[in-house]
Amino acid sequence: MSRDIVLKDRWEELVQKLSSTFSDGDPLELDGIIYLVGVQEKGNYHRSYKKDDKINLMHIAICKLLEPYGYYEFEYFDEEGWPHYTIKENLPPLKAGEQSVLMKEAIVNYFLERNYIQ
């Protein structure tokens, strides 16, 4: 089975599983899943976040998701428990479709490592 088909199948499994848990079955979009990763990494699950915090959560998620690819490196947690990352390497210029595939692959790998999907 080709890598693209495996990624597509795993992505669909992940979206279905997350959507049934977090959005009453309405399919979550990429940004929603990135937000969930940010909440997972921050660790405060049962709290509501302001708009600025939501943007910061998505930034944390992107750093965490792209860390295994060598683009970011975890630096420290601040006094409020927010993780901070440094840029190790700038992302190459990617077309919108390429960005989407990279993020989906990174998200699938994140949830595979946590045994949330197979």
Image (spheres, rainbow, N blue to C red):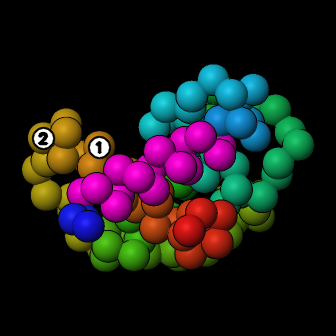
Q: Which residue matches tag 2? A: 95
Callout 1: helix, strand or loop? helix
14 magenta-colored: yes
* Whether residue 112 is situated above or below residue 9 in the rendered picture: below
Task: Residue at 75% x, 26% y: name it.
Answer: 24
40 magenta-colored: no
- State how far apart marks 1 and 2 are (Cα): 9 Å
Q: Is 75 displayed left or right of 43 in the figure? A: left
Q: Position of residue 65 (x, y in %)?
A: 45, 62
Q: Which residue matches tag 1? A: 100
Magenta part mainly helix, strand or loop? helix
Q: Position of residue 89 (x, y in %)?
A: 24, 70
Task: Residue at 51% x, 74% y: name it.
Answer: 74
Q: How many marks?
A: 2
Q: Position of residue 40 (x, y in %)?
A: 70, 56
The quarter of the rendered structure image containing the N terminus is bottom left
The quarter of the rendered structure image containing the C terminus is bottom right
User: What is the three-letter code of the residue carrying label 2?
Assistant: Lys
Q: Which residues are magenta?
A: 4-18
Callout 2: helix, strand or loop? loop
- Local packing at callout 1 (Cα closer than 10 Å; few below 14, some 14-19, many 20+) is few
Labelled pair 1, 2 in contact (Cβ < 8 Å): no
Closer to us: 106 or 38:
106
User: What is the three-letter code of the residue carrying label 1?
Assistant: Ser
* Whether residue 75 is situated above or below residue 95 in the rendered picture: below
Q: Is residue 41 visible?
A: yes
Task: Residue at 57% x, 28% y: name it.
Answer: 27
Q: Is 40 displayed left or right of 14 in the figure? A: right
- Local packing at callout 2 (Cα closer than 10 Å; few below 14, some 14-19, many 20+) is few
Q: Is residue 55 visible?
A: no
> Which of the two labelled residues, at mark 1 and mark 2, occupies the earlier sequence position?
2
- Splitting the image into 4 quarters, where does residue 6 fall? bottom left
